[in-house]
Amino acid sequence: MTDLPSAEQIFAGLPDALLIIDENHQIAKVNPVAESFLGQSARHLIGAHVADQIQFQDERLVNALVNKDANVAARRVPVTLKGREAGLVNFDIHTIPADQRWRIVSIAPLPTDGPVVEQRSSEQDQFSVRAPDILGHEIKNPLAAIKGAAQLLDRSLTEDQRSLTHMIKGEVERIAKLLDRMQSLSTNQPAKVEPVNVHSLIDRARQSIETAYNGDLKIQDRFDPSLPDVLVDPDAMMQVLTNILSNAVDATKNLENRNIRVITRYSFGAALSVHGTDQMVRLPVEIIIKDNGPGVPTELEQDIFSPFVSTKTDGQGLGLALVRKLMNDMNGRIRYERPGGSKNTQFILFLPVAEQG
C-alpha cells in the first residue's frame, strides 16, 4: 500500500499561498506558493509581522490581520504587498482548531485579465453615439409601461388603481429627464449621484416592466435587506435596471417557464481605479439580474457593450452601450457572464456605497 503524504508535503503542495502566523501576528511558516506570491524566500518572511507584508484597503481586513480572534473570509479583494499592488485575491484567515494560538492565512490570486476590476479606457471615456438613435431605442421601454397602465385605467379607475397614475407621472418625468441626458451623452460630465436605497429603484423598475404585461409577467427577487445605500444617479440607475430587465424579458419571451430573478448582495466585491489618480473605489454592492433565456452567442460575448452590436434582428445595438456609459459615469461597473458554463445568463452591476452620515 502506498504511504500517504505527510502533513508537510500536503502543506507544501497546496495551490494557494498559505501562511501560518503566531499569537504575535508574526509569520511562522509559509508554503512555496506564498514565497512566490510575496516575492520573498521563507528565510526572509519567517519572523516578519504579517501586516508589514500584506495590506488591504478594507479596514475590516486590516484589523483581521492583527486580531487573534478574527476569522474572516473575503472574495475578490484588492491586496497590496509591501506597497506594491498585487491585484485581486480571495482571502481567508482562521484560527487553527487544534491550537488557537495559531492562525492560517490563505490567499488565492485571481486572474489579472478578468472583467471585475476595470480601468477607464479612452474608448470608454470617449464613448459617443447619436442621441436621436439612442432616444428611439430607449423610449420604447417607458412607453410600454405607460401603455400597459393606460389599458388598465381604461377599464375602470378604482381606489386600488390610483397607484398607476403615480407610476404614469413618474415615467413621464423620467422620459423628460432622459431627453435632457441624451443631449449631453457624448460629454464626460460626472453623474449627479446621491445616496439611494437600491431596492426602491429595483421595485420601481420591476413594476414598470410587469405593468406593461398586464400581470402576465412576474420578476422574482432575493434581496439582502441589510444593504447600505448606494451612491448613484437615481434616474440613470432606473434606466440601467429597466434596460437589463427588458432584455431579460425579450430573451425569455418564447419560453413556457420563463425565470427572471433579481438578487442583491454585499461582498468585498470589485474595485476600480479612478482615471488619472491612484485612488481606488470599492464596489461592494452587487445587483444580479438572471434569466433562463438562450444568452448571447459566444462570438458576441466580448462585444455586447459596444455600440451597434445586437443579438436582436430588429435591434440597434445601443441599449447595453448606453448602460455601460451610465454605469461608468456613476463609478460603477457591469459584467456579463454565464455562471458555471450554464445556459442561463446574468448581468452583475457593481455599485459604490454612500458614505454613512
Image: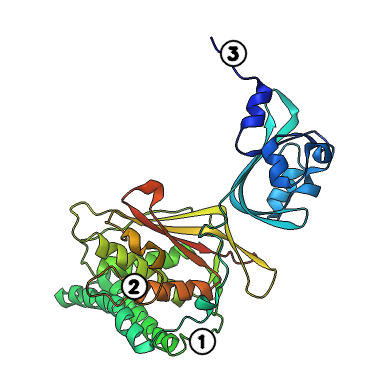
Q: Identify the residue position indicated by label 2 in the image.
A: 309
Under mark 3, the amino acid is Asp
What is the crowding at mark 1: few (fewer than 14 residues within 10 Å), some, or many (at least 20)? few
Q: Identify the residue position indicated by label 3 in the image.
A: 3
Element marked by disc 3: loop
Q: Can residue 105 be seen by looking at this rendering?
A: no
Counting residues from the start of the chain, the first of labels 3 and 2 encountered is 3
Under mark 1, the amino acid is Thr
In this rendering, would 116 be left or right of 36? left
Position of residue 112 measured from the top left corner of the image (x, y, whole percent): 57, 56
Under mark 2, the amino acid is Val
The correct choice, above or below, for 53 with respect to 16 in the image is below
Q: Would you identify the image quadrant in which residue 66 lies?
A: top right
The CA distance from mark 3 to mark 2 is 58 Å
Q: Which residue is drawn at 56% across and 72% down?
A: 120
The correct choice, above or below, for 268 with respect to 24 in the image is below
